[in-house]
Amino acid sequence: MTTDPQTQRKIANRLRRARGQLDAVIAAVESGGKCRDVVTQLSAVSSALDRAGFVIVSSAMRDCAADPGGTAEKEDGLTTEELEKLFLMLA
């Protein structure tokens, strides 16, 4: 994963937001919340996770593009093809 502290903070914040939204979904389900509200909140969780995933993969792709075949690729052990597959998993 990226070693850029600002990007790491951004990813962690998105994941914390998703965790908070998921907690709200669980609470709504347990309290018999309205279906529309539960689905809307669940959609927000899914979007937050997707965005975090895209940031992770795009930062890895950017690192590899800046240093093709160099240390960025070797640290995570990901080839360009593997990064493309990860990116497509999120699409």
Image (tube, rainbow, N blue to C red):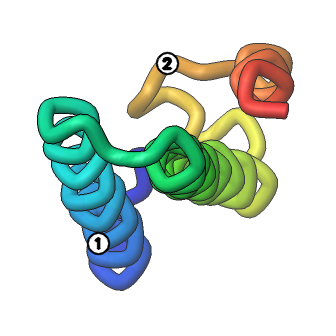
The residue at 72%/59% (across/down) is 62
Q: Position of residue 4 (x, y in %)?
A: 38, 73
Which element type, helix, strand or loop, lies under badge 2? loop
- Drawn side of residue 79 relative to residue 42, left or right: right
Horizontal arrangement in the rendering, residue 29 relative to residue 82 (left or right) = left
Give the x, y percent position of residue 50: 61, 45
The mark found on residue 13 in the picture is 1
| Near-viewer residue (52 or 76) | 52
The amino acid on which the numbered mark 1 sits, given as a three-letter code, is Asn
- Res 86 label: none
Residue that appears at 34% across and 55% down: 18
Q: Residue at x 73, y 62 (%)?
A: 66
Determine which quarter of the picture holds residue 46: top right
Q: Is residue 29 above or below residue 14?
A: above
- Reply above or below: 75 against 43: above
Does the residue at mark 1 contact the one at mark 2 (Cβ under 8 Å)? no
Alpha carbon separation for disc pair 1 and 2 = 25 Å
Closer to the N terminus: mark 1 or mark 2? 1
Q: Which residue was labeled with disc 2?
A: 77
Dot 2 amino acid type: Gly
Query: Circle 1 — which element?
Result: helix
Give residue 7's quadrant in the image.
Answer: bottom left
Quadrant location of the C terminus in the rendered image: top right
Q: Dot 2: within a 10 Å radius of its alpha carbon, few (fewer than 14), some, or many (20 or more) residues?
A: few
Q: Residues within 10 Å of mark 1 (few under 14, many from 20)?
A: some
Residue drawn 40% across the image and 32% down it: 75
Q: Nearer the viewer, residue 72 or 7?
A: 7
Task: Return the x and y of residue 30 as percentages of the image width and height.
Answer: 14, 31
Q: Is residue 67 visible?
A: no
Please say whether residue 49 is visible from this viewpoint. Answer: yes
